[in-house]
Amino acid sequence: MRSTIPLLIIALLIVTDLSGQSRSRKRRVKFKKGFELQAMAGVNLSQIDGDLFQGFDQTGLNAGVQVNALLAPSIGVNVGMMFSQKGSRTQHLSPNPSPRYPKDRNLRLNYVEIPVTLKLALSRKQTRSFFEVGGTVSRLFSNNIEERELRFVEGTSLVEISPEFESTDINALAGFGYDIGEHISLIFRYQLALTSFYENPDLEPGRQFIVDRTPDIEFMRNYNISFLIGYRI
């Protein structure tokens, strides 16, 4: 009887070890797959740097898909393809907010974007927070502009300069998100263009600061914040 006890202990250890190896192999197999497809949809709040107006006043759609590649349990790389609407809503005259001048100047820019981000999770739990950092390449394919006729208002006309808009933007991106269960993510992103989509080589110094006229624009550069919901397939 005494001789069988060590044998039973050895057998139990072998079974436990094999069971642990089996679970480890399952985890490794799951990790080796390494790729997820994620559908994304949400809203942009956008503004333009360089037009002397402030506020994320232009709303637009931000939607598409991205592929998530797992490099480690808490590290991943995401590459997406997104439709993103940017632009601004401003008043024609003085850049100082006033009830006298409504925000009647509407610029909407429609982009196709390729975001590439590094995802850093803060824990390995199923529900977890994460940071994102990276950049995007954006391609402008159309725009829509609403503004008064400038025979009544002096200054830069967006309609007149729109043929000079650059079609490619390079952007920096930073974000924060929260994974809920296996499928849902809530994501907040801030994006700032590193390149201007318009430059005015003929601007007269000081002209953009004259009160009671639409500012002459020196340059235009996108920036926006995004609120997204992602669903991993």
Image (cartoon, helix red, strand yellow):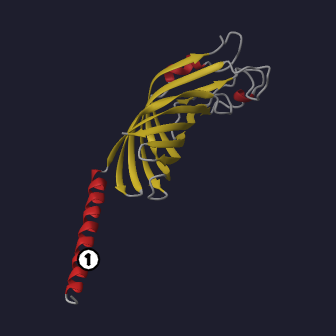
Look at 68% across and 33% down and name the residue there.
54
Left or right of residue 122, residue 93 in this image: right
Query: Residue 219 in the image: x percent, y percent?
Result: 59, 32
Left or right of residue 233, residue 54 in this image: right
Q: Quadrant of residue 156?
A: top right
Q: Quadrant of residue 154?
A: top right
The residue that disc 1 covers is 13
Front position in the image: 75 or 192: 75
**Quarter of the figure with the C terminus:** top left
**Quarter of the figure with the N terminus:** bottom left
Look at 55% across and 30% down and name the residue there.
199
Front position in the image: 1 or 16: 1
Query: Callout 1: helix, strand or loop?
Result: helix
Query: Residue 183 in the image: x percent, y percent?
Result: 42, 43
Query: Residue 33 in the image: x percent, y percent?
Result: 28, 50
Query: In this view, which residue lies farthest toward the front?
Result: 1
From what the image shows, is residue 208 above or below residue 148?
below
Query: Residue 114 in the image: x percent, y percent?
Result: 40, 37
From what the image shows, is residue 8 above or below residue 122?
below
From what the image shows, is residue 138 above or below residue 161?
below
